[in-house]
Image: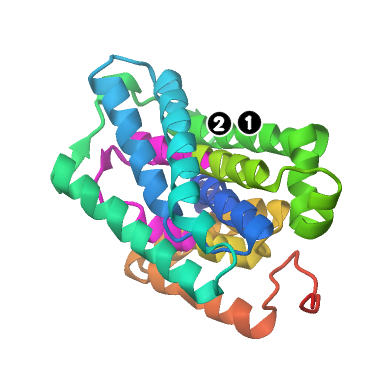
Amino acid sequence: MLEFMQQLVNGLSLGAIYALIALGYTMVYGIIMLINFAHGDIMMVGAYVGFFSITVLGSNVLVAMLFAMIACAILGVVIEKVAYKPLRNSTRIAALITAIGMSLFLEYLTIFLLTPQQRVFPRDVFPMHNYHLGGLVLSNKDIFVILSAIVLMIILQFIIRRTKTGKAMRAVSLDQEAAVLMGVNVDKTISITFAIGSALAAAAGVMIGIYYGTINPLMGIIPGLKAFVAAVLGGIGIIPGAMVGGFVMGILETMVSGYGNSMYRDAVAFGVLILILLIKPTGLFGKNTGEKV
């Protein structure tokens, strides 16, 4: 039982990171029906901004995370304006291929500018402390990741439910043409959506750097794909679904690693995607709705 609880804590930490990345996928899909496969690489850029903020500027972790979120919010808006906006009225496959191309561009631009070698986060910036609760070991990194993710999710829910921008985002998500008629600036709303999603991914990137201690230019591929699975699992386009899906994926992955073989954890994650698409394609929180004509 104790081992199960320990794996559950580890799973919540990993799930919090997946949930933050999945939120970006689901927000963008909810607004413009695009799977932004460059999202994992925006997370990678955030991790590098956080790393250089700590090592060059001497920032603490929270300031580094803030710098990373601002930088990636700007990057997300630029990508939307340059790569996705011109294709908004084209076929879905064209936008999807562009997203994959943007993903590769960010990866190899980073390799070109910063070399492919791993960077190690300084240990003294976040010294490791373990807290023993009965037989349960809880590290300060686990607490930081889980609490930071929960705070960011609460802020996101507040923005979406209580602000004028959030109302505009929900209106565009429901019916873009009707939102235009009601005076909503659709272009601005889409840009804000990309900015918020990219900022959350950047926060997740800094968390990964702190949690695992190393970053590299290709670090966004697997977490990005797993976060996409989490978004599909919860119901893509549905924000609470992305949160729940992220935590479920994190817990499932740590349980497979703890009780089975860590070599199979990626296979299990993508096996879940296949099962969800076969059994309930709309995800746990999704509803069957016909295509709007």
* Res. 222 mark: none
Q: Is residue 291 left or right of residue 44?
A: right
The reply to whether discs 2 and 1 touch (Cβ–Cβ < 8 Å) is yes
Residue drawn where x is 36% and y is 34% of the image? 210
Residue type marked 2: Ser
Q: Nearer the viewer, residue 146 or 55?
A: 55
- Quadrant of the snapshot with the N terminus: bottom right
Magenta stretch contains residue 210 = yes
Above or below, 54 relative to 173: above
Along the line of sight, the residue nearer the viewer: 168 or 23:
168
What is the magenta range?
A: 200-226
| Residue 230 appears left or right of 257 | right
- The residue at which mark 2 appears reads as 148
Determine whether, in the image, residue 255 is placed left or right of residue 181. left
Residue 56 image position (x, y, % from top left): 23, 19
Give the residue furthest to the bottom: 278
The picture quadrant where one finds residue 197 is top right
Q: Which residue is mark 1?
A: 151
Q: What amino acid is labelled 1 in the image? A: Val
